[in-house]
Image (tube, rainbow, N blue to C red):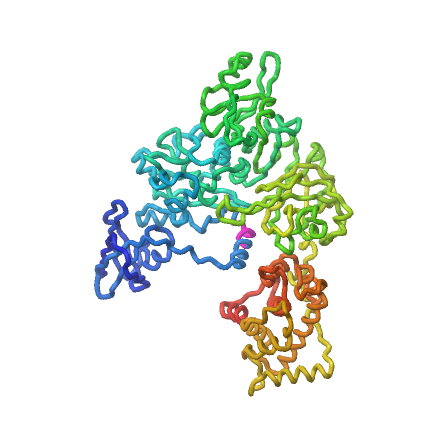
Amino acid sequence: MPHKLLLRNRNHSGVDLVHWDGIAPCMNISLLTSEFGAFVHVFTFASNKPETGFTLTEIASRRVLAPVFTAVISESTTHFIIHKTDFEMPPPAVPHGMCLKVINDRNMKGGMGSETNPLRFMDQDYNFLQEYCLRSRQRFVDEFFPPDPRSIGEGLLDPDVMARVEWIRPTVLYPNVAEFIVETVSRFDYAQGNVGNCWFLASVGALTFQTKLLHKVVPDGQSFSHKYTGLFHFRFWRFGKWYDVVIDDKLPTYNGKLIFVRSKTYNEFWPALLEKAYAKVCGSYADMHTGRVSEALLDFTGGVHMHYELKTAPSDLWEIMYRAYQSEVLMGCETPPGNEKRLPNGIILGHAYTVTKVHQVMSGKNPVQLVRLFNPWGDSEWNGDWSDKSPLWNTVSDEDRKQLLVHENGEFWMSLKDFLKTFDNMDICCTCPDFLEEKSACRWISKYHHGSWVTGSTAGGCMNHPDTFCKNPQFWLRISEFDKACEQGQKNVLVSLIQKPDRRHRRNAAHHGIGFCVFAMRSEGKFGSSFFSTRKPVVTSGHFQDARQVMKFFRLEPGEYLIVPSTYYPNKSGEFILSILCKNEIHIQKDTERMEKDFLVDLGSSEVSYTEKMDERSKTKMLFRQYSDQYKVVDAEKLQQLLHENLLSGNKNSEGFGLDSCRSIIAMSDLNVTGRLCGPEFIRLWNRIMTYKGIFYSMDSSKDGVLSLNELQNALEKTGLHLNEDILNLMFVRYGGASEQISLEGFICLVMRLNCMARIFQRLCENGKITLDESEWIGLTMYS
C-alpha cells in the first residue's frame, strides 16, 4: 500500500533542512488548498511514476518556484511537516568563461539566437516553467527579477515611496476583468510613468504599427485566463542575438496604482508587462532612465539602423521617410537636449517621439509634405502650423481633414520644414533597407562579425596614435562589380559598429568613444604602421562617439577595402559587432581568417633544437644528480628548487615557478606518467627550457626582463609556434596578468602548454575534430 505524505506550509524558520533524494521512486501531486501562499499538498508514493508526477529530486533541482519548500524527513513516519524557506537560491551552475564561450559560439553556428530560435535569457525556459506551474498549480514568481526594491533600482523613487511599494498581479488589482490586450494593440494604449524612458515608449509606439514585428516581440497566446500561471514572455534582440525573456506579472504599485507605464484602459496590461521585461534585460527599471530611441528600435527589429542628423539631412529625406512608412520599418526622433523643458510651441526638449506617418496634402494648389508624430506622454502636442487647431487645415479637402485630423491624443502633424527645424535627429530601423531606392530590383546583402579590443593586444586606439593604430582588428572587404539593377543611387554601403556592454546593468556599462576607418587596399595579411602612415582613409565614421552604436551610409566603388574599427583611446578593452550592408555581392573576412592554415596553432618546427656543448651536457647531468632522489628521479618540489636556484637566480622581475606550475611541467614532460622525471626526460626538458630562455631574452628588445604582446608574438614565432590573433590574445590575457606583460617563467609555461595541447589535438584529430570519452578527456586535461 503506498504511503501518503501530508505536507503543510508553516511560518517557521531556522529549521535544519534535509533533502530527500531518491527514497521514494515517484509521487503524484494533488493540491488540496491554496490561500495567500499557504499550500497543502498530498504526495502519494507508488511503484510506477504517473505521467503527471514529479520526483522530489526533480522539484529540488528545478529552479522554477519561489518560495522553496524543503522537508525534514524521517524514514519511519508517513506524515511530515514542510517548512517554508525564504532564502535566495544560488544562481544555476554554469560552465566557466571559456567553456561558456565555446557553447555560445556553437549555439550561434547552430542557429540559436535567431528570431525563430531565440536564446533563453538567464537560462529560463518559458515552456518548462509554464508546464511546471500548470501541473503544480502554482503562480510563477521570478527570482531573477524579484518583486522587491532591487528590480526597481536605486535613485528612481523617494525612500518613502519605495517603502510603500506593493507588487501586485493584475488579476488581484482587477479580479476577473484584467486583460493582456483589450481589442487591439495601439500607441494610444499607454502613457509614460515615473521613469525617464520616453525613448523606449516612443519605440513601442512605432512597434504597434508593424504587426509582424509586434508578434515577434510580443508572442501570441498570452492571457490572464487560458492557462494563466502569472508567467509571461517577450523577445528582444540584444547585441547580435534574439532572447526570450521570462517575467512574472507582479507589477510595482503605489496606493493601488501602477508606478511606471500605465494603460489608458484601466484593465489592459500588455504595456506594463512589456516594460517590465525590458527592464529585466536592462537590469532594473532605474536602468531604463534616459536613453536613445535608436536603442529600443534596434532591439525590436534586430536589423538595420540608419541615423540622420536633421540639420544636415539629405534633400530626399521626405521621400525616404515616405517609402519607409510603406515598408516594415520603425521610425523615431529626438529633440535637442534640454532636460524635458516644455517650449512655448508645445515641444519637449530632450524628449523622444514616434514618427507615425508621412503624408502629402494639397493646401489650396500647393503640395505640402507633412510628418505625423506621437508623444509617449500622451499629451503636450505641437501647437504651430498644421497642429490640431491650426487654420491651415481649412485649406485642404474635407476628405483629408476628416481622415488625418484627430484632436488631443498626444499625436500631431507638422510640415517637413518645421520638423527639420524643431527636431535634432531621426532614426530608422528595419530588417532590410530596400526602401531606400524607389523601384530598385537590387537586394541588400548583409554580413556581420563579432570582434574585440584587448588591452595590450588589439586595442590600438584611433589614428591619432600611429604606433598602435595598426594593432586594431582589421577586416578585408571586397565589393563585386555592380549589377545593372544596383547601379542607380549615390550610396551603396552601410557600415555599423556596435559596442557590447561590459556589465549586467545598463547604466553601469562603460561606453568608449568608438568609430571606424575604411582604406583602399590590394594585398593580404595584417597591415602594419607603415601602411597607415602613408594612406588616408577613403571613408570614416566621423567624430568618435561615446555611444552604443555608430554608423555611416556611403558609396564605395567595386574593389578591395580595409575596415578598421577602433576606440578613440588605446588600451580600452571591449567587444563589438561590425555590420556591413551592400547593394551588391560582398565578401568580408577578418585579417587572421585570410591567413589561416589547417590548424589555428601552426606548430611548424616548434621542436626547436638546442645545441648543447660538451661541458654543458656534463653540467646538465650534474644538475640531475644534484637534485634527483635515491630513485634517480626529479619530482615537482625538486624541480621548483632547481629552477629557482639555476634559472631565476638574480631575476628581479620573477615571481618564481609555483609548485602547481612545476607539476604541470613534469606532467607535460613525463612520458611514463609517473609524476617524476628520469634522467633522459629531465635532460630533454632542461634543453627546451634553456632554448626558451635564450629566445625570451633575444626577443626582449626593451631589455626590461618581460615581453610585451608584440615581443611575445615574435618570441612564439621564434619557437616555431604561429598563432592566429584570437588565440594570441587569449594567451596574453591568461599568462600576462594585471601587468599585461609576460615573465620568463610565464613564457616557458605558455610555450610548453601550448605546444603540448596543440600536439595532442593534431595527433588525435580526424577531419578537424577529436573524439574523447569522459575518462580520456579528464585524463588529458587534468594531467598536463
In magenta stretch: residue 109: yes
Q: Quadrant of the N terminus?
A: bottom left
Identify the residue at image location x=72%, y=83%: 615
Q: Nearer the viewer, residue 477 or 727?
A: 727
Residue 695 point in image, percent of width and height: 70, 69
Residue 75 point in image, percent of width and height: 24, 65
Q: Nearer the viewer, residue 23 or 553?
A: 553
Q: Quadrant of the C terminus?
A: bottom right
Q: Is residue 264 above or below residue 12?
A: above
Q: Residue furthest right?
A: 534
Q: Residue furthest bottom?
A: 630
Is 540 on the left-hand or right-hand side of 229? right
Identify the residue at image location x=65%, y=80%: 683
Residue 749 point in image, percent of width and height: 61, 69
Q: Nearer the viewer, residue 703 or 26?
A: 703
In magenta stretch: residue 525: no
Q: Please indicate, yes or no, whether residue 149 appears anywhere in the rendered image.
A: yes
Q: Nearer the viewer, residue 239 or 378?
A: 378
Residue 705 point in image, percent of width and height: 67, 66
Identify the residue at image location x=51%, y=21%: 344
Where are the magenta residues, as a range? 106-112
Identify the residue at image location x=41%, y=49%: 144
